[in-house]
Image (cartoon, grey):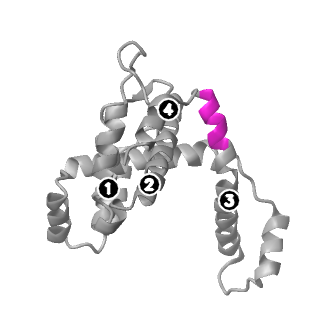
Amino acid sequence: MKIKYLFLFFIFLFFFAGCTEKKTEEEKPYLIRAGSSVITVQEFKRAFELSKTAYAYDMVNDPEFLQKARVQFLDQICERLILMERARELGINISALELKSAVADITDGYPQEEFEQELLESMISYHDWEQEVKARLVMEKVIAKDLTSSITISADEIADYKKKHNKKSKAKKENIDKSITDLLKREKTETAYKSWLDKLQEKYRLEINETDWKKITSES
């Protein structure tokens, strides 16, 4: 696990800590709005400045790179807002056991002292990092429940895959078929993801304040 991985976890946690509660348009002007979540210009700028520390010095001093990074950051925020709105509607939660298992997988083979030192150097508390892991698990559950679960793989598709890849193994047929099914489901999920997300954006009325966004992108 690299420090950038840990740090980007925290960036999103810091960023979304202030936008999970329902806000009205009168309470706050928005840069991004989806469902009950609102992100202001200042929140975006503050989070983006923090995210820049995860990049090399020469990269953050490259105007072209920064413009691309801003757009990418905006896209990531919009995507996350939509997924979290969907999670709220579906009533998706993560149990203590699920969180414990995920944390164990992430930190497996990582020396405890070194892990704690990296958190310390990044000014991230263990609790904050753990909560961000939980948020990511929620989003994964949304995708699995709302998208992947609706995807079916036929026997013909499995047979075609075996034929194309000359799939031969001493493992049990059921195990091989399950592995192929899981693989094909992942591929179909990736293919269907954008159109599925676009529909959710319409459902939750994702809005970007174009006037303020143009001001942000014109900054050096």
90 and 170: which one is in front? 90
Q: Nearer the viewer, mark 4 or mark 2?
A: 2
Provide the residue designation for mark 4.
Answer: 85
Q: Which residue is mark 1?
A: 52
Q: Is disc 4 placed on a helix, strand or loop?
A: helix
The quarter holding residue 168 reads bottom right
Disc number for residue 95: none
Q: Residue 16 at x, y = what percent? A: 35, 38
Taking depth in this image into account, of 179 and 23 the one nearest to the observer is: 23
* Front disc: 3 or 1: 1
Q: Residues within 10 Å of mark 2 (few under 14, many from 20)?
A: some
Q: Which circle's residue, 2 or 1, is located before the other in the chain?
A: 1
Residue type highlighted by circle 4: Glu
Question: Of the residues under marks 4 and 3, which one precedes in the sequence?
Answer: 4
Q: Which residues are magenta?
A: 196-203
> What's under tag 3, amino acid-wise?
Lys
158 versus 37 height, above or below: below
Q: Which mark is residue 185?
A: 3
Q: Nearer the viewer, mark 3 or mark 2?
A: 2
